[in-house]
Image: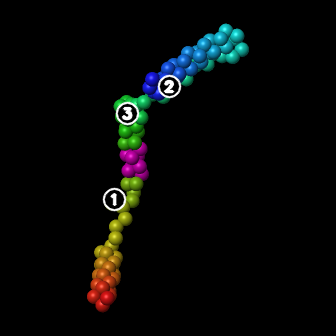
């Protein structure tokens, strides 16, 4: 006999025993009937299509509000001035020239 089949039969038997115990306990009236344990549902997705749509609409609304609040700032965010770009470019050219010089010497 296959071990999987044995395990399946044992689980079925456990389920039947659990239901029987719950029924007997509920007859006593002191302990509420316990629901038998269910197997976890296996799903391909964690959210329904309706839930995804609702979440999408909420996020669009949230980002629209955020965009409105940021309207007072510069339109594109932070920008580097032309002088700063030129200064950084010169520094990088100098750095690469030094590296190239060291590489030739080695």
**Secondary element type, mark 1:** loop
The x, y position of residue 58, in whole percent, is: 40, 39
Q: CA distance from mark 1 to mark 2?
A: 65 Å
Q: Which residues are magenta?
A: 61-69
Q: Tell whether label 3 touches label 1 (CB within 8 Å).
A: no
**Secondary element type, mark 3:** loop
Which corner quadrant holds the N terminus?
Answer: top left
**Secondary element type, mark 2:** helix
Task: Report the side of 17 relative to 59 (left or right).
Answer: right
Sequence-first tag of 1 and 3: 3
Q: CA distance from mark 3 to mark 2?
A: 25 Å
- Which residue position is annotated with label 2? 7
Q: Which mark is residue 75?
A: 1
The x, y position of residue 5, in whole percent, is: 45, 23
Q: Residues within 10 Å of mark 2 (few under 14, many from 20)?
A: few
Q: In front: mark 1 or mark 2?
A: 2
Q: CA distance from mark 1 to mark 3?
A: 42 Å
The x, y position of residue 27, in whole percent, is: 67, 9
The x, y position of residue 50, in whole percent, is: 37, 30
Which SS does the magenta portion mostly show?
A: helix
- 39 shown above or below 31: below
Q: How is the image coloured?
A: rainbow
- Which residue position is annotated with label 3? 44
Most extreme residue toward the top is 27
Identify the residue at horizontal 38%, vertical 50% (top origin): 67
Identify the residue at horizontal 63%, vertical 15% (top origin): 21
- 60 shown above or below 67: above
């Amino acid at each position: 006999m296959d071990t999987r089949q044995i395990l399946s039969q044992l689980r079925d038997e456990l389920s039947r025993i659990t239901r029987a115990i719950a029924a007997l306990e509920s007859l006593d009236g002191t302990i509420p009937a316990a629901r038998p344990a269910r197997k976890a549902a296996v799903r391909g997705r964690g959210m329904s299509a309706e839930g995804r749509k609702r979440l999408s609409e909420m996020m669009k609304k949230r980002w629209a509000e955020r965009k409105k609040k940021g309207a007072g700032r510069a339109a594109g965010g932070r920008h580097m001035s032309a002088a700063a770009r030129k200064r950084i470019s010169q520094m990088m050219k100098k750095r690469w020239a030094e590296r190239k010089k060291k590489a030739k010497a080695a």
